[in-house]
Amino acid sequence: MIFHNTQLENGLQIIAELNPHAHSVAIGYFVRTGARDEVMPVSGVSHFLEHMAFKGNEKYSADDVNRIFDEIGANYNASTSEEITLYYGSFLPEYIGTAMELLSTLIYPTLRQDDFDIEKKVILEEIGMYDDLHSFTAYEKVMQAHFQGHPLGQSILGSVQSITDLTSEQMRAYHAKQYMAGNITLAIAGNADWDQILELVHQFCDVWPAGSTDRPTDEAKPTPGAQIITEKPIQQQHIMQLAPAPAAKDPLRLAAELLSVIIGDDSNSRMFWTLVDPGLAESAELGFNEYDGSGTWLTYLCSDPELTQSNLKLIQQIYNEVNTNSITQEELDRAKNKIASRLVLRSERPMGRLSSLGGNWVYRQEYVSVEDDLKLLNGVTLDAIRELLKKYPLGHSTTAAVGPMANVIVD
């Protein structure tokens, strides 16, 4: 692997992990903008812009963009989170010039009014579709409650009202502010030539406007609370709970990732053997999410409503035991092996490396190779786990419940 990085005069950062033995190349534009960077009148605009990107520009229509991506056999898409909008594709190395031009087109689309009006209907349909997904509703509600008054509590999709009221002028103003070159990182992984990459970047990106926007990253201080949403027609109860956890730049984040696997992975974790394997719950998981300045433990439970209260008590018993007595060396070693395997298997494809490559740079301005990842992972000790639990104990400060139960008791 050969790592390169540089920065254009306008602020665009370019990083590349090149592997001449790979059979493909993956490219991603990581735009440091998402739901947390919006104000309420334009809630959902980042995700809306992701859709509008594929409508093309003066040179390429929406049909052109999708047709040409298909012609070169690319695997391409985009995603929006609370903090990053990502435009990416993977393809054969001989098509890097075409792919770079199309992906660069996505960053500065024309944002035509006709396209805006059509896509607004698509976004509203998408909001309706996700409203029917009860686990998603629980996630939206628990994020809003946990991060009340903090930008991370803002919805990625927005609301029917905010999208209905959004104008194309508001979208263009948001795009002009957030899509400056200094807010963007271009990441490349796989089989490519660095000199060719630079030539293409200068060709397509030199004209992008310079500048960047600030993002407040104060750690959230959640107020404990619960939201109960009663949905009588459904058969299962969905519970989501959040508690503070390490932020993206906190060295304890690796310990948190390991602990989440030990306690709440979807196989061979404490929660799996206590709740899922005996048939007490369909799902019982603990996840760790890191953000700029904040982080969360996310507990998810899906079970028969009649078992919800007893299942929540079992989860809390697990958390109390771990908070008091930590974990065993055997559990830590097993989790290290599990995560190491996932890291290595994912890294064997350029597309699998792209997310890690870009994420590390956007959040921490650092390059971490697979070998570095494995060393950092193996360096996590039981002392680090104990330090983590002292600072960020497992538990819940916020709960959202969706299902037939009119009341959920959270101890």
Image (spheres, rainbow, N blue to C red):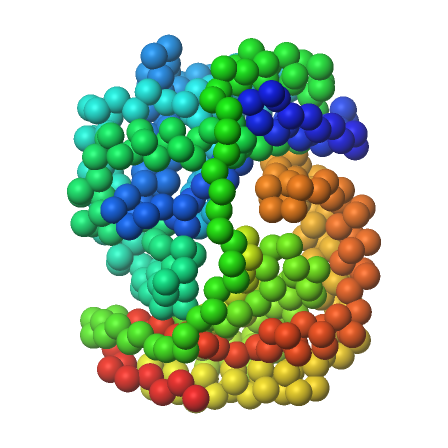
Q: What is the x, y in percent for residue 28?
A: 55, 32
Q: Is residue 144 above or below residue 114?
A: below
- Identity of the residue drawn at 44% across and 17% down: 68
* Res. 22 visible in picture: no
- Does residue 261 appear left or right of residue 403 in this picture? right
- Identity of the residue drawn at 71% across and 19% down: 194
Q: What is the x, y in percent for residue 86?
A: 49, 37
Q: Give 392 or 260, whichever is nearer the viewer.
A: 392
Quadrant location of the C terminus in the rendered image = bottom left
Quadrant location of the N terminus in the rendered image = top right
- Identity of the residue drawn at 50% across and 72% down: 243
Q: Give 97 or 176, whichever is nearer the viewer.
A: 176
Q: Give 349 or 390, whichever is nearer the viewer.
A: 390
- Does residue 386 appear left or right of residue 305 in this picture? right
Q: What is the x, y in percent for residue 112?
A: 26, 22
* Res. 117 visible in picture: yes
Quadrant assignment, res 309:
bottom left
- Does residue 197 appear left or right of residue 211 in this picture? right
Q: Is residue 103 above or below residue 257?
A: above
- Does residue 35 appear left or right of residue 372 in this picture? left
Quadrant assignment, res 225:
bottom left
Q: How many marks?
A: 0
Q: What is the x, y in percent for residue 47?
A: 36, 41
Quadrant assignment, res 109:
top left
Q: Is residue 382 above or below residue 85?
A: below
Q: Give 320 or 216, whichever is nearer the viewer.
A: 216
- Identity of the residue drawn at 59% across and 59% down: 247
